[in-house]
Image (cartoon, rainbow, N blue to C red):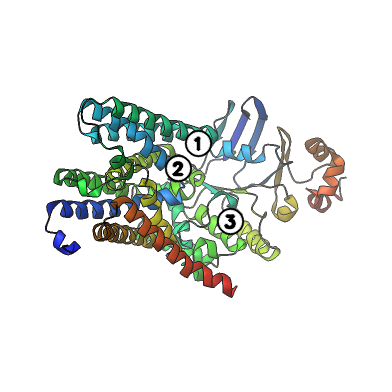
Amino acid sequence: MPSFFDALSYEFVQNAVLAGVLASVLCGVIGTFVVVKRLAFISDGISHAAFGGMGVCFFLGIDPLLGAIPVALATAVALGLMDGETIRSADAMIGVLWAVGMAVGIVFVYKTPGYAPNLMTYLFGNILLVSRHDVFVILALAVSILAVLAIFFKGFVAVAFDEVFARVQGVPVRALMVLLLSLIALTVVILIQIVGIILVVALLTIPPVISLMLFKDLKSVLACSVLVGVGITLGGLFLSFAYDLPSGPAIILLGAVLLIGVYGVKKVPRRRLA
Amino acid sequence: MAEGPVIAVRDLTFGYGREVVLDHVNLEIQPRDFLAIIGPNGGGKTTLLKVILGLLEPWSGRVEHNVPGGDVGRRGRLGYVPQFSTFDKNFPLRVSDVVMMGTLGRRGFLRPSSKADRAAVDRLLERLGLAEIARAHVSEVSGGQLQRVLIARAIVSEPRILFLDEPTASIDAESRGSLLALLRELNEEIPIVVVTHDVTSIAPMVRRIACINRRLFYHGGPELSQEVLEETYGCPVELVAHGVAHRVLHDHDHHGH
């Protein structure tokens, strides 16, 4: 059996590594905002809603990404425009969009004539199916997302930290929230290909949660999240290859083990000393 | 310098759902004011503050801003110190980063912070005795320190008026003393508006009081009469037990009452 490093000469393995690294960089940066602004449930909702668009594209026989992107963006904008005062209905609305998206997707996949795509691939992802074309699409999306994030960075931090104070200062809070959710939506669409719909939220949250335990200022947290994301993605790929495991779950489980380890090192001794 | 009120609330009515919270309120804030907005819990104090700050749209009436030098609109011209339970203390920011946020309004959130901004932040941290904790994480500082950090954030862009929501609610007596000294110093230059249910704690500073309980019951100097307070709170027994405005009453009332 060839080693993981020998396998790097295969194009599909190269694609997987490139896509994984790009996605991890995105995850670290966007995920940090997801965690500090507590948008994990919204992100998960967008991910599941996007499946509706993918299902329709299967049925029509076109690239599922073409369906996932507009549906994810529409969901993000709709949730971003919901009034902050009606937070209870926003919570329920996420649940509704989540379920309806999945239902639409499954109905269309079921009715797709001829070859039916394997649902498992989209639910749990398969990074080894990423094509060179996909890598370029992911690269373009990742660069755009990070560029927009860099331009609006101060505004996003202000909105994430203290929305009320930002509004008093004249920062367009609502518009920035819609923009941030749109960036999250695009990130989610990219991640679906790597780890699948169900595991997206884990890749968005695990690296920042680890980093937040280790660092106190935002820039260090962002840098650490990116490194942790790249580390668990490449490590998970290696485990997937070495032990014949599905790639998405391998990445997530490696992250979870790291999370528990860091938690143990950081939290347990302090509690004992106290 | 423009004469007349810095901010005027004209016949303002606001509510949540169908319930009226503020009923035809008129209020003026003068250039050197130290105004305490007092009243029972749920009486609309904080709501009034939010409407003045532009966070809530009034049902009817209006808030006139006549802020000197306010040619850049309201951005950065209103300093606001929230109750500090309103944000997540575990957010990964250092004290100096939080204060830097106060420069957003004037510089705009698209421009990177300048050397001048950083110098202003450093000067202010020094002045407020926060220099040694500038690099500390917001979760690591004491209640009194955090209160000063939030004041620093509010005044770093040199606002023309400062609003504080329950500033003495979660700090100890010592911090309260330095807070009052700081507010007195700031009040030399700008009007200050404090929303509080505990006017005793800031009584020596207060120049004027507004009693809010849905309607504005009193608006004027701190020589409150027992009748006004009873009318505002609607429950004289609780008022005395509460101690609210009690000190004000005694400090200023031996001539009149």
Q: Label 2 neighbourhood size at 10 Å, few (<14), some (14-19), many (20+)?
A: some
Look at the numbered discs 3 and 1 and tell me whether their residues touch, using CB distance below 8 Å: no
Mark sitting on residue A255: none
Specify the subunit that label 1 lies on.
A
Instruction: Label 3, secondary structure: give it.
Output: helix
User: Which amino acid is tagged 2?
Assistant: Phe
Which residue is denoted by mark 2 in the rendering?
A41
Q: Please say whether residue A85 is visible from this viewpoint.
A: no
User: Which amino acid is tagged 1?
Assistant: Asp
Look at the numbered discs 2 and 1 and tell me whether their residues touch, using CB distance below 8 Å: yes
- Numbered disc in front, either 2 or 3: 2
Say whether mark 1 and mark 2 are on the same chain: yes
Instruction: Label 2, secondary structure: give it.
Output: helix
- Residue displayed at 36% across by 47% down: A199
Which residue is denoted by mark 3 in the rendering?
B186
- Residue displayed at 28% across by 24% down: A111
Q: CA distance from mark 3 to mark 1?
A: 42 Å
Specify the subunit that label 3 lies on.
B
Look at the numbered discs 2 and 3 and tell me whether their residues touch, using CB distance below 8 Å: no
Q: CA distance from mark 2 to mark 1?
A: 8 Å
